[in-house]
Image: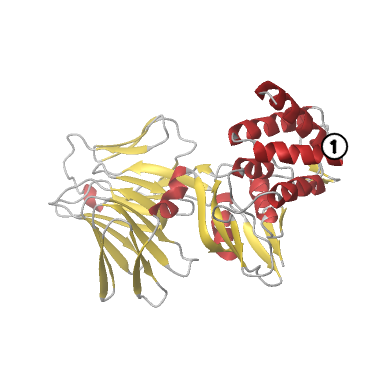
Amino acid sequence: MAMSESHTRLAFLFKRYYEGLATAAETTELMSLINASRDDNHISQLMKEAWDGLQNNETVFSASESENLLSAITASQTPQDESFVKTNRNVRPLTWLRYAAVLVLLMGLGIFWKYKKSGNGEKTASSTQIKDIPAGGNKAMLTLSDGSTILLDSAGNGLLARQGGAEIRKTKSGQLVYNLNGVSQNNLETRINTIKTPKGGTYQIVLPDGSKAWLNAASSISFPAMFANNERHVKISGEIYFEVEKDKARPFKVQFADAEIEVFGTSFNVKAYHDESSSQTTLIEGSIALKNGKESRRLVPGQQTDISQNGRLLTEIVDVNEATAWKDGLFFFKDADVETVMRQVARWYDVEISYEGQVPLRQLTGKVSRNVNISELLGMLNYTGINCRLEGRKIIVAK
């Protein structure tokens, strides 16, 4: 079949399937054409066009139909790559193969419920209105040493404040920058500023020495308006990615909980949330020394040191992309249990997590954009066998 004929036929079959009108023969033909295609982007685009067309025509597509399509696709494939979800119970895994774009689009378009447009343009599921929750974004509060506060997400670009001659500016890209050109000490090292992101917030700052820090949701960093002559010291909580400027005369030190990191000009990620069972420091490049109580470690790039609740240090080689994916707009899970996943979801979407009965025994592996609405993410989780639903700002995970 020629390319143009194949394109037209696929578009027709997707439309027929989404309308619920496809015959058994047409469904089989659709699966065959999907499997034969070597262009996932082409398949994804056709699916999107078919779905957009149905949305415009207020057509209803049921969850059972999407499940049947997904089952047909997965049943016709041979596992060749890592699983999107691994289970330790008798649950069939979903394989993450060359048709990943098909599965992602099925999940990402939100076709897990019966969608139709109501009179005011909002989507409804059956007779119950679904109130979606968008992904987090640039949100943070700056607290100056005098106690005054500035909401950074709503503040205009340009000069925000002055501290003893030091200028605090917000750039067009939303980044916070400290300008110390020609500024003397003036006790600025004692004027401590704090930036805090809420749940559902993230922010980037250029510190007074030119070092950069990215704050994940529910995180904070405290630092002086101007670093002292002998060292650069910051205190953090939550998760922060650093790119530190080299300065042999002034070591850069990061304090969190009972631990301290001494930095020698490098890039690294610190994850130290209070609701996690341990903290992780991951070195991307350069060199750092981590100390916790009497124990200490010197890390090389690619290593991660875990500090357990009892204070013990465990260092291992890891995939650094997993630790820094959040900065690049991704959830990245490798054999993550349900509670670990849900804690990240709760922080990014500012929701509460509740469990009905026992926590599902699942291990998730895969990458998901952090830019999707929560309905789309929950749809993905439901397809992996995690039964969850949204009620207000609470996600309920059922057995």
Residue at mark 1: 22
33 horizontally vs 251: left or right:
right
378 horizontally vs 334: left or right:
right
Rendered location of residue 383, percent (x, y): 69, 54
Rendered location of residue 95, percent (x, y): 61, 53
Q: Quadrant of the N terminus?
A: top right
Q: Residue furthest left?
A: 249
Q: Does residue 47 show up?
A: yes
What residue is rendered at 26% in x and 48% in y?
Answer: 244
Mark 1 secondary-structure assignment: loop
Q: Quadrant of the C terminus?
A: bottom right
Name above or below for residue 327 compared with residue 234: above
Colour logic: secondary structure
Q: Does residue 134 show up?
A: no
What residue is rendered at 54% in x and 55% in y?
Answer: 82
Rendered location of residue 397, percent (x, y): 69, 62
What residue is rendered at 65% in x and 41% in y?
Answer: 102
Rendered location of residue 222, percent (x, y): 34, 53
Q: Nearer the viewer, residue 68 or 160?
A: 68
63 horizontally vs 281: left or right:
right
Name above or below for residue 5 compared with residue 191: above
Using a 10 Å C-alpha cutoff, classify the residue at mark 1 as few (fewer than 14 neighbours), some (14 to 19) or many (20 or more): some
302 horizontally vs 7: left or right:
left
Quarter assignment of residue 157? top left
Amino acid under label 1? Answer: Ala
